[in-house]
Amino acid sequence: MAPETSVRKRLAVVALVVVLLGAVPTGVAAQSESTVGGTVVVGEGETIDDLETVAGTVVVEGTVTGDVSAAAGDVRIADTGEVGGNLEAAAGSVTIDGSVGGDVDAGAGNVEVGEGATVGGEFTAGAGNVVVNGALEGDAAIGAETIALGDAATIAGDLRYNGDLQGNSDAVAGSVTEDSTLGVEVGPTLQPLTTWLVALYTLALNLLLGAALLALFPRFSDGVADRVSTDPLRTGLVGFGVLIGVPALLVAAAITIVGIPFSIVGGFAFAFVVWIGIVYGRFAVAAWLLGYAGLENRWLALVVGLIAGAVLARVPFVGDLLNFLILLLGLGALVRGLYARRRTAETGTRGRRDRLGPDEPTGD
């Protein structure tokens, strides 16, 4: 098997493993209080303390005795679900069919409090559409394009709203006040939680990809680190050229119409290559710096480099600039390594053919 064929097959394995593991849902999260990714379900009959999650879908069918903080595509408290504390949700849709003992703070495209649902504390929502058919036992502040109060709705406190209020206005026991300052921004501020969970999820995927690269391509990975440490300027310039040149070629291909499929596939492929460049860059720079301390261990360099890169990403401006330079180094070293391997493969093939007579089979 030719070296370049082996490389292609190994890269395909890496891509498949990362994509599959990155897309696998977490399934049931009842035993874990903090989760990232996939579908998170607290099953009926199960009880946990608090739930903090970033996921595609969050479903509470059991009991959460404390708070729920969720950033997701969909968040649903089922009719059997019970949240003892507060519910903070930033999602595409938030549906409450069960009970929430504390406050509800929701920002979503659609928010619905179903018939038979209860919210014990204050209800705050910023959304495109809000439908209330259940019982809100405290005050409510709603900013939405459409606010619909169903026949079964009850609001024990006051209602402040901004939007088109429709339906059963008698549902409000207290005062009803239009407040133009309310909008979608009255929803939850989950940014700190979301940011950190996404950062941890990204770090985990980077570690997974890096481990696969080091395990499958140990010599190639060492070569990447060597190119960064011995010739950083040239390597960085190559990375910069690739980062600018490849997108330009893809755009040019898309302009030709017939090249659109190639441009789309090439865009995904290039994005994956850039990801590898990020991981390799952080690994290589860490290996370079650890070498000065006499710590020459590729696995240690991988962990240190990826953690340091994640920390740098939290530093405004300077961190982004350093991570960009590290990306250029990693991308340049990766491309130089692939080019050198291809040249070696071609040279080896030509040399083998040169040693054969003109009538002898090449074995290809």
Image: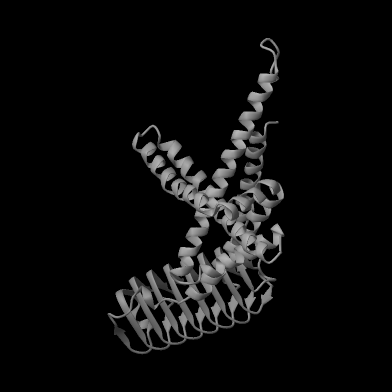
Is 235 placed above or below 356 here?
A: below
Residue 34 placement (x, y as % from top left)? 62, 72
Q: Is residue 77 visible?
A: no
Residue 76 placement (x, y as % from top left)? 53, 68
Q: Quadrant of residue 340?
A: top right
Judging depth in this view, the residue of 200 and 303 nearest the camera is 303
Position of 136 with respect to 280 (left or right) is left
In this view, which residue lies farthest toward the top? Answer: 359
Q: Residue at x 48, y 80 (%)?
A: 104
Q: Quadrant of residue 33?
A: bottom right
Judging depth in this view, the residue of 86 and 22 nearest the camera is 22
Judging depth in this view, the residue of 36 and 263 nearest the camera is 263
Q: Residue at x 42, y 80 (%)?
A: 124
Is 70 placed above or below 283 here?
A: below
User: How many dots with numbers?
Assistant: 0
Q: How is the image coloured?
A: one colour
Residue 164 placement (x, y as % from top left)? 29, 73
Quarter placement of the N terminus: top right
Q: Residue at x 66, y 64 (%)?
A: 292
Q: Residue at x 50, y 45 (%)?
A: 270
Q: Is residue 306 visible?
A: yes
Residue 54 placement (x, y as % from top left)? 55, 67
Quarter placement of the C terminus: top right
